[in-house]
Image (cartoon, grey):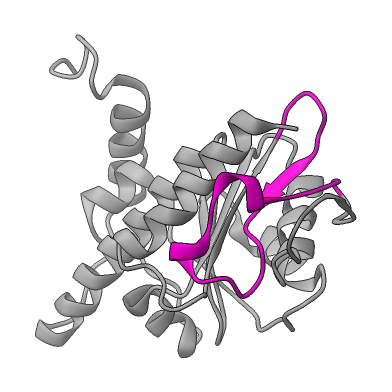
Amino acid sequence: MLEALRERVYRANMALPKYNLVTWTAGNVSGRDPETNLVVIKPSGIMFEELAPENMVIVDINGNVVEATLGASTDTFSHCAIYRGRPDVYGVVHTHSNYATAFAAIGNSIPVCLTAMADEFGADIPCAPYARIGGAGIGETALAHIGDSVAVLMKQHGVFTIGASVEKALKAAVMVEDVAKTVWLAMQVGQVERLPEEEIAANYDRYQNRYGTAEASRG
């Protein structure tokens, strides 16, 4: 069942090591089916080279296994908590990408000090308090602190990103690590300066609504 979504979730999971967002068996991607509300997620503790579309796990919105040949990710309940709290979200990604997780390790958010961040996120990437792995607590804490962003750092843990599709959540995860690296490097040179709110809003509007269209060069 859900063969097309299994394939998309599988491909997104395989992109995590490709973009250096995870190591060994860490990290996971899930996707929610808009018709059935079922969730497809990576299995637990399996090397990426052993993954296949058919061993992606299907669970219901509460994390109960519907169809599986392997155990579901230990982050399943976190993903499902996000889906329950955000009906507009159809993709969730969790990584331990190095630079972004370095900010999480010390409990710091990543300020919007780059136009690339304003474009993609339109807000600071917040850092939520520590929450224990294995239950819905991480997802609930992430929801409580993500605000207007599509990414949140979990203190002393890692990164969660959300999107209106699996692919958009994946893109957000890639971009979080990219900007986190740049901001970290900038901090070695001097003090970073947050963009003014009006510039953040203007860049976000341009990128989200006009970038790649005929109107991109106007206004």
Q: Given the current orientation, which residue lies at the most extreme left position?
A: 189
- Residue 35: x and y in percent read 78, 23
Find residue 9 and report its image quarter: top right
- Between residue 169 and residue 205, name the one nearer to us: 169
Q: Is residue 7 left or right of residue 139?
A: left
Q: Is residue 3 left or right of residue 123?
A: right
Tell me, yes or no, if residue 81 can be seen here.
yes
Task: Work out which quarter of the rendered image holds the N terminus and state it.
Answer: top right
Q: Is residue 58 magenta?
A: yes
What residue appears at the point 19 percent right and 9 percent down from the top-left corner?
Answer: 214
Q: Is residue 80 left or right of residue 121?
A: right
- Between residue 207 and residue 2, name the one nearer to us: 2
Task: Work out which quarter of the rendered image holds the C terminus and state it.
Answer: top left
Tell me, yes or no, if residue 121 can be seen here.
no
Q: Is residue 188 left or right of residue 27?
A: left
What residue appears at the point 38 percent right and 70 percent down from the top-left corner?
Answer: 110
- Residue 149: x and y in percent read 51, 51
Span of residues in magenta: 33-61
- Residue 198: x and y in percent read 33, 42
- Between residue 94 and residue 152, name the one nearer to us: 94
- Between residue 47 and residue 16, name the one nearer to us: 47
What residue appears at the point 23 percent right and 21 percent down from the top-left corner?
Answer: 212
Q: State whether residue 87 is above or below residue 68.
A: above
- Residue 92: x and y in percent read 59, 51
User: For the image shown, how many numbered marks are present on the structure?
Assistant: 0
